[in-house]
Amino acid sequence: MSTNTHIEWTDATWNTLSGCTRISEGCLNCYIERTPPFRMAHRRFDSPAIGGKTGIILHENRLDLPLHWRNPRRVFVNSLADLFHDDVPTEHIAKVFATMALAERHTFQVLTKRPARMRSLLADGGFRLMEATSDEATAQALYDAPWPLPNVWIGTSVESQKWANIRIPALLETPAAVRFLSCEPLLGPIKLASTDGIDWVIVGGESGPGARPMHPAWARQLRDQCQTAGTAFFLKQHGEWAERATLTPEDRIDVWNDKRVTYVHPADGRTQPHGAWGMHDHLEGWAVVQRVGKHAAGRELDGRTWDEMPRTLATATTGSEGRP
């Protein structure tokens, strides 16, 4: 729980629950078990594979915290969990949305890898949330609020084309003031069918132990798609790996056995060590990357940072304003 954060695209985090289940490839090196709250509680995933769980813990004593924050801020909702996880009671989700409705001065950023459940709970004007709660104040706050909530941004995580194809349609069918994509960790190229209805795209490479490299072309391709469509683009980080200039013969000798230098295939992200140089001299598009650490890799792309943000007064493009 933090009123401050090092996450580049937000100002604060608000964790009303913690814990998750690995659901796809992007979860395999999940950062949550490396955070202080998980380390201090000795909480870890019970398996390194997809399906591994930490268990879900609700922190309902934190539900009203944003109401006590006086200065407006962008708030990442449940950075240590997924609000729409199957094990999270719908009543808890209703209470979170009630607080967001009441804390109008803040902008809340809700990110999920489970947009199908999000769509089912939000697509009817919030009535399913109202029906799920026995708390009169929660129901009243939801009933009185405009729908979709104008201060709530809704996003989904997509790490590859496969998951973009699955998750983005559900996001687009969910009424929201702002919709966004978090392409982090970006594990392959993504071609968006359209950016209609998408207001913001965040891109980031993977960091931490076992981080997989991001081919720099993947970030450029998403940047270019956003630029063409007028969609806000935010490059959060390159991750642990930085693009390296084309290697000279002298470089080849210097880093021949350096495990920090590798090749990344542009189509599927598979890697080959630098020692296999001869295998790849003739292959176009492989990127040479070097593991230098997140901070050294930085956030610049083609000589500048990309910190674009969506229009905060964007209107819903799916569903009607207000409730049916």
Image: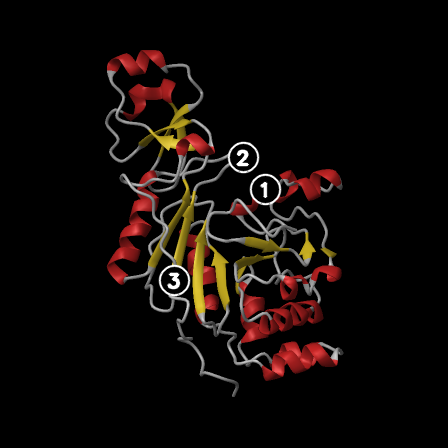
* Residue at horizontal 27 percent and vertical 12 percent from the top: 250
Horizontal relation, residue 4 to residue 136: left or right? left
Q: Which mark is nearer the camera, 2 or 3? A: 3
Task: Estimate the spatial distance between the alpha carbons at disc 1 and disc 3, rounded to whole Å.
Answer: 26 Å
* Residue at horizontal 50 percent and vertical 84 percent from the top: 322
Q: Decide which of tag 2 and tag 3 comes sooner along the chain.
A: 2
> Are there few (<14), some (14-19), or many (20+) residues within 10 Å of tag 2?
some
Mark 2 vs 1: CB contact within 8 A? yes
Residue that protrudes farthest toward the front in the picture = 70
Residue 97 shows in the view: yes
Residue 82's place in the image compared with 242, above or below, is below
Q: Position of residue 173 (x, y in %)?
A: 46, 72
Horizontal relation, residue 162 to residue 219: left or right? right
Residue beneath label 2, please?
Answer: 208
Amino acid type, mark 1: Tyr
Horizontal relation, residue 209 to residue 60: left or right? left
Mark 1 vs 3: CB contact within 8 A? no
Residue beneath label 3, please?
Answer: 310
Q: Position of residue 304 (x, y in %)?
A: 30, 42
* Residue at horizontal 40 percent and vertical 71 percent from the top: 313
Residue 45 shows in the view: no
Q: Position of residue 138 (x, y in %)?
A: 69, 77
Task: Estimate the spatial distance between the alpha carbons at disc 2 and disc 1, rounded to whole Å.
Answer: 7 Å
Kindly indicate the quadrant of the structure image that contains residue 56: bottom right
Amino acid type, mark 3: Pro
Residue beneath label 1, please?
Answer: 31
Residue that protrudes farthest toward the bottom in the picture = 324
Q: Decide which of tag 1 and tag 3 comes sooner along the chain.
A: 1
Q: Secondary structure at mark 1?
A: loop
Task: Estimate the spatial distance between the alpha carbons at disc 2 and disc 3, rounded to whole Å.
Answer: 28 Å
> Are there few (<14), some (14-19), or many (20+) residues within 10 Å of tag 1?
some
Amino acid type, mark 2: Gly
